[in-house]
Image (cartoon, grey):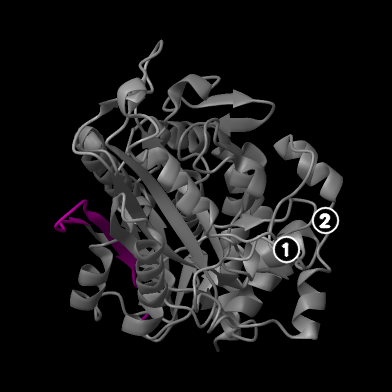
Amino acid sequence: MEQIKQYIDQHRDRFLDELFELLRFPSVSADPKYKDSVLQTADYVAEKLKQAGADNVEVCPTAGYPIVYGEKIIDASLPTVLVYGHYDVQPPDPLELWKTPPFEPTVRDGKIYARGACDDKGQFYMHIKAFELMMQTNTLPCNIKFMIEGEEEVGSNNLGIYVKANKERLKADVVLISDTSMISMENPSLETGLRGLSYLEVEVVGPNRDLHSGVYGGAVANPITILSKMIASLHNENNHITIPGFYDNVSVLTDDEKKALNSAPYDEAEYKKDLDVEELWGEKGYSTFERTGTRPTLEVNGIWGGYIGEGAKTVLPSKANAKISMRLVPNQTSDEITKKFTEHFEKIAPKSVKVTVTPHHGGEPVVTPTDSIAYRAAQKAIAESFGKEPIPTRGGGSIPIVALFEAELGIKTVLMGFGLDSDALHSPNEKYDIFNYYKGIETLPLFHKYYAELSK
């Protein structure tokens, strides 16, 4: 540990400067106007892997954005860790809500504010710096492979093709991912599961053109009104999702699992204060931890239609749209839920409109084993670095490729994130604590150390 801390102290400023360089690339995979920047980011990541000591570094083309690969095989008889991360980021919109420009990293109160600071540039870059540290101090105890992709924020559509075509190259004993969060730095935790995802877009079309709301209002269905009513009907008075069969296969926690999950530190007043809300909202009969980690949800991510420019325009719009995501739990599948949503949404549409449902992407829920060598190595690493045993938690987000790795490579994943739920992921003013960044670089070499030792 002394050697680790000494190396970090010696290179502290450079580690931060390099992360800032990475954060300045507007690598938004969802918007084609950022294409050149996304490709430049991949080249930057590849160069930093080479500088850190990785061999066979390659920017691997796909039908979309490239995957950056690198490795260091020190002994074929030793275990191999496959590190996954993503260099693409969410769109920064709405720009006017950022206190400082999203692609000009700014430090305030010990926190780095920038798009991608936590999700996932700050977190995957910890692994590259931890790898550099182990190489420079001659302490790398196992083989390591890196696979950093550029399409996670748009569904990782080409990653599955790459993985299937490169099974031998990606052969490993465990996948290590830092794209999740901890309860807090005072209460470190390890996520033991992630929810799945069904993401789709709906369109409701009424008349064949926008109409004058005075001439036609009251005689023709308004698509925005109809869409709003349809969406509102998807939850009942207990905030239970009303799609027939939606809960058919939902895995229910045992009493012991509930008790363990809800034993984690939680201050509801602080939770509400952080979000500036007076009351929480969710499925009746479940705690916040259960709602955000073990229960399925349906959320509207965006909704639009009609005139939204400056001033007034009394229009009855021709159509209205919404983007909707459903988080899934064990035993649900994205295909099944997408089909049930589509059938239900089309069924409840009145004859005055036409409805189209367009699926975008999905992913499957996963639960990671807590009795594996890799999980125990992560526990030991965090306990040594933080001086406190990590609390097992369930993550509310989705990383669709975790299920893919298990299906195609036959290996489990350890979710060893250092972000916080309050880091404003996908929102304006995304942040990542500088302390967390360095703490990750400090803790990750310990994971490799204990994983190698426990694998003997």
Number of residues whose C-alpha sits closer than 10 Å to that of mark 1, classed few (under 14), some (14–19) or many (20 or more): some
Q: Which residue is at the front of the view, 32 or 348?
A: 348
Range shown magenta: 59-76
Mark 1 lies on a secondary structure that is helix
Q: Three-letter amino acid code at disc 1?
A: Phe
- How far from the left and from the top, in percent, is residue 190? 66, 66
Q: Is residue 444 visible?
A: yes
Q: What label sits on residue 266 in the rendered view?
A: 2
Above-or-below relation of 226 to 159:
above
Q: State left or right for residue 128 relative to residue 200.
A: right
Mark 2 lies on a secondary structure that is loop
Q: State left or right for residue 247 relative to residue 411.
A: right
Above-or-below relation of 66 to 32:
below
Q: Which residue is at the front of the view, 24 or 366?
A: 366
Q: Circles 1 and 2: CB distance less than 8 Å?
A: yes
| Distance of label 1 from label 2 (alpha carbons) | 9 Å
- Which residue is labeled 1 in the image? 289
Q: State left or right for residue 370 relative to residue 15.
A: right
Q: Kindly identify the residue that appears in the image at 74 percent across and 64 percent down.
A: 284
Number of residues whose C-alpha sits closer than 10 Å to that of mark 2, classed few (under 14), some (14–19) or many (20 or more): few
Q: Is residue 126 visible?
A: no
Q: Kindly identify the residue that appears in the image at 78 percent across and 44 percent down.
A: 279
- How far from the left and from the top, in percent, is residue 70? 29, 61
Above-or-below relation of 369 to 313:
below
- How far from the left and from the top, in percent, is residue 254? 74, 86
Above-or-below relation of 399 to 50:
below
Q: Which residue is at the front of the view, 289 or 19?
A: 289
